[in-house]
Image (cartoon, grey):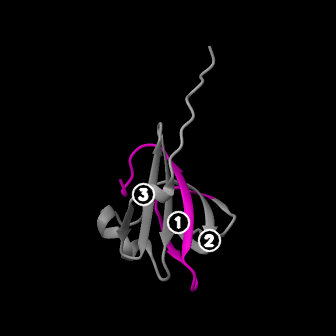
Amino acid sequence: MPYNPAMQKVSLADAPVEVFGRISKKTAVLDGVSVTEVTFGVGAKWSEDLKNYAGTELCDLPHVSVVTAGTLAVEMKDGGYEEFRAGDVMLLPPTHEAWSVGETACTFIEFSRGNDYYA
């Protein structure tokens, strides 16, 4: 018999906001999947705003996200660099640094399964 899960609906507007310096997030949880709206405010940088909370030198989480506003710069441990803008879909492997670019906050919607530093 085919798998037929029940429909689910959760609103990010109703999710509590968690703030880590200039970075904020709201998470809606569905059956086995978390959907998180992450905002890197102007001047936000992972190493300045989340590094102490995460307890690692670089972000060790993978991310699958859609950028909805602004620009996010990402530099990998190996030196690879990319900028992601509104409308871009990004897949980030572990061991990266990230920061907002310019005078506009960067917002992205992330899809994940399992635990992460923000939980």
Between 108 and 83, which is closer to the camera in this rendering? 108
Disc 3 marks which amino acid? Asp
User: 10 Å neighbourhood of mark 3: few (<14), some, or many (≥20)?
Assistant: some
Q: Position of residue 47 (x, y in %)?
A: 39, 73
| Magenta span | 90-119
Closer to viewer: mark 3 or mark 1: 3
In the picture of the structure, the residue carrying the numbered disc 1 is: 78
* Count of number-bearing discs: 3
Q: Position of residue 106 (x, y in %)?
A: 56, 73
Give whichever of discs 1 and 2 has the lower sequence position: 2
Disc 1 marks which amino acid? Asp
User: 10 Å neighbourhood of mark 2: few (<14), some, or many (≥20)?
Assistant: some
Disc number at residue 96? none
Between 62 and 40, which is closer to the camera in this rendering? 40
Q: Secondary structure at mark 2?
A: strand
In the picture of the structure, the residue carrying the numbered disc 2 is: 69
